[in-house]
Image: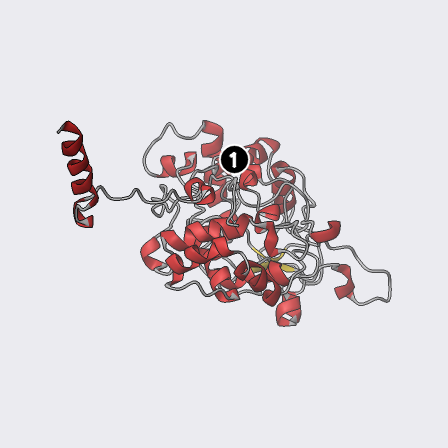
Amino acid sequence: MRRLTLAALLLAAACRPAALRAPEPPPAPPAWEAENPVRPLPRPPLGSGADFARVPWVTPEKARLGRWLFHDPRLSADGTISCATCHEPQAAFSEERPVSTGIRGQVGRRKAPPILNAAWPLQPVFFWDGRARSLAEQAKGPIENPIEMGNTHEGAVRTVAAIAGYRPYFRQAFGDDGVDIDRIAEAIAAYEATRLSGDSAYDRFDAGDEKALSEEAIQGRDLFFGRAKCSACHLGPSFTDARFHNLGVGWKAPPPGRPAAEGFADRGRWEVTRAEKDLGAFKTPTLRNLARRAPYMHDGSMKTLREVVVFYMRGGEENPWLAQDARDADFMPCEVSALVAFLESLEGTGHEDRAPALFPR
């Protein structure tokens, strides 16, 4: 009798309607997804100027996808170079080398500028020469540059589209799993937009914390916004006017009889506009997190912040197109040190990250 009762119970359980059965647990996400989940957009730190309401195309899903793509070397022709190769997280998304190195060890002409608060520029121009007009357009450039990632846009798209593990994340970010270069670039740009810098000692001082800066840094702040006139070009939340200025960096007088323009191995903005006034002019870089971005200038030619300040104080390097606002000023060594202390106070937070440990397969 007992055996019959047990059998009846088992039969009843087997015939129970599916709606009454315990639900099957959802499948575990792939390891790469668990390691890189969708995260809310970051809260802008004090003084950063970031405002995600102004960039509605930046979403958590795109930023998560872009984080993988930014760090994925498979976008390069030989699978060795990613965006992060030159935009290094530990260097505030600039680099610790004087100039960038691409596939097959090819050395470029310029140092990678930082990606900090980049989605909110005063002027919509990107790269040292301003050749890109949006953050997404900027993201496309290195992929097809022959001495950087050395790929083609078509080649990068084929590579990413062939990785089945990427498809659900394109679908989450864009509504379907189609892959094209515009979506790749927009996702990378969305991730770049989440790399912020603020809440520095300067920001806290500016917000009313009188103890946030040392006396030396306060003296440097007064010089920066006053007699030194640094803020004429280094202005706004990111300390850059996003315009182009010739300070003679990289200038070497050509041999007698040769055109003066040959004094610049890199002609900067002129390469985009072909306007003579733009010879040797480069975009004003942000000063955020400057202390961790040595060496300095577009060509990495200056090793220390003190060297940079002294160069500016003596009015740059004389050349036929030197900016009119460059000037030779007489500053005491202690004032140079004060300016350096102020620049060091711009070390902020909000950009910190590391490369993903795993990528979609």
Asked if residue 357 is positioned above or below residue 3 in the image, the reply reads below
Residue under label 1: 344
Judge by depth and name the residue closer to the eye, 237 or 137.
Answer: 137
User: Judging from the image, what secondary structure is the residue with disc 1 in?
Assistant: helix
Point out residue 76 in the picture as x, y percentages from the top left corner. Answer: 63, 56
User: Does residue 193 appear in this view?
Assistant: no
Q: How many marks?
A: 1
User: Residue 314: x percent and y percent?
Assistant: 65, 46
Instruction: Describe residue 351's horizontal placement relative to residue 71 as left or right.
Output: left
**Residue 57 or residue 74, whichever sits in front:** 74
Spot occupied by residue 178 in the image (x, y as percentages of width and height): 46, 65
- Residue for point 63% across, 40% down: 96
Based on the displayed image, in which of its 4 quarters is residue 203 positioned? Answer: top left
Tell whether 352 sits left or right of 105: left
Q: Is residue 48 visible?
A: yes
Residue at 54% across / 64% down in the picture? 132
Residue at the limit of the structure toward the front, as seen here = 1
| Residue farthest to the right, as pictured | 256
Q: How is the image coloured?
A: secondary structure
Say which of 289 and 355 sits in front. Answer: 355
Q: Residue at x 66, y 57 (%)?
A: 77
Amino acid carrying label 1: it is Glu
Question: As drawn, which residue projects farthest toward the bottom?
Answer: 274
For the N terminus, the quadrant is: top left
Q: Residues within 10 Å of mark 1 (few under 14, many from 20)?
A: many
Image-quadrant location for residue 143: bottom right
Where in the figure is residue 7, as x and y percent of width and height? 19, 36
Q: Residue at x 56, y 40 (%)?
A: 91
